[in-house]
C-alpha cells in the first residue's frame, strides 16, 4: 500500500469523527490494509490527523495471547478521554 492510500484511509477514518459524519461499516475496499504494517501505518496516520495521544488501550484475547495496543487521540480542548459508560467510574476517581 502506498503512502497516498494510507493517507486516504486515515482521512476517511478521521472524517468519521466529525459531528455530522455518516457512520460507515467498513473502510472502502481499496483502502483496506492487507498487512499488519499497513494497519499500523493507517492507525498512526489517522492519529496524526486527530491530534495528540490521549492514552493507551491495551488488551489481549487471553492470558497467553499477544497484547494489542492502540493510542486513542485526546479530545480537543480536554485533557481526558471522552466519557463512555465504561469509563464513568474511573473518571470520577480523577
Image: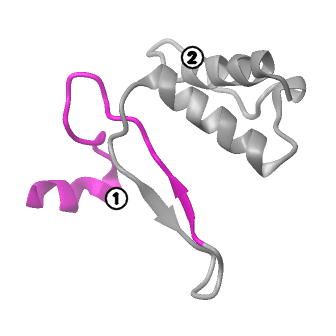
Please tell me which residue is depicted at 50% across the width and 20% down the height of the picture. Answer: 49
- Residue on which the image places disc 1: 86
Q: Earlier in the sequence, mark 1 or mark 2?
A: 2
Task: Establish if 23 lies above or below 43.
Answer: above
Q: Is residue 3 left or right of residue 45?
A: right
Picture colour scheme: one colour
Image marks 1 and 2: residues in contact by CB distance under 8 Å = no
Q: Does 94 sit left or right of 33 as displayed?
A: left
In the image shown, does 87 or 45 lie closer to the viewer? 45
- Kindly state the secondary structure of the residue where label 1 is placed: helix
Quarter of the figure that contains the N terminus? top right
Position of 37 relative to 44 (above/below): below
User: The C terminus lies in which quarter of the figure?
Assistant: bottom left
The picture places residue 42, in percent across and down from the top left corner, at 67, 33
Indicate the position of residue 25 as horizontal and vertical percent values.
73, 34
Residue 55 appears at what percent x and percent y?
Answer: 34, 48
User: Extreme bottom residue here?
Assistant: 64
Residue 19 location, x and y as percent? 44, 16
Q: Which residues are magenta?
A: 67-94
Determine the residue positioned at 20% across, 61% down: 90
Residue 73: within the magenta?
Answer: yes
Residue in the image at 20% along x and 30% along y: 78
- Identify residue for label 2: 15
* Nearer to the camera, 37 or 79: 37
* Label 2 element class: helix
Amino acid at each position: 500500500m502506498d503512502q497516498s492510500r494510507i493517507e486516504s484511509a486515515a482521512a476517511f477514518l478521521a472524517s468519521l469523527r466529525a459531528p455530522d459524519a455518516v457512520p460507515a461499516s467498513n473502510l472502502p475496499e481499496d483502502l483496506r490494509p492487507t498487512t499488519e504494517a499497513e494497519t499500523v501505518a493507517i492507525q498512526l496516520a489517522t492519529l496524526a490527523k486527530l491530534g495528540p495521544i490521549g492514552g493507551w488501550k491495551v488488551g489481549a484475547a487471553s492470558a497467553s495471547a499477544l497484547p494489542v495496543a492502540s493510542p486513542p487521540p485526546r479530545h480537543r480542548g480536554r485533557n481526558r478521554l471522552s466519557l463512555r459508560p465504561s469509563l464513568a467510574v474511573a473518571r470520577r476517581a480523577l
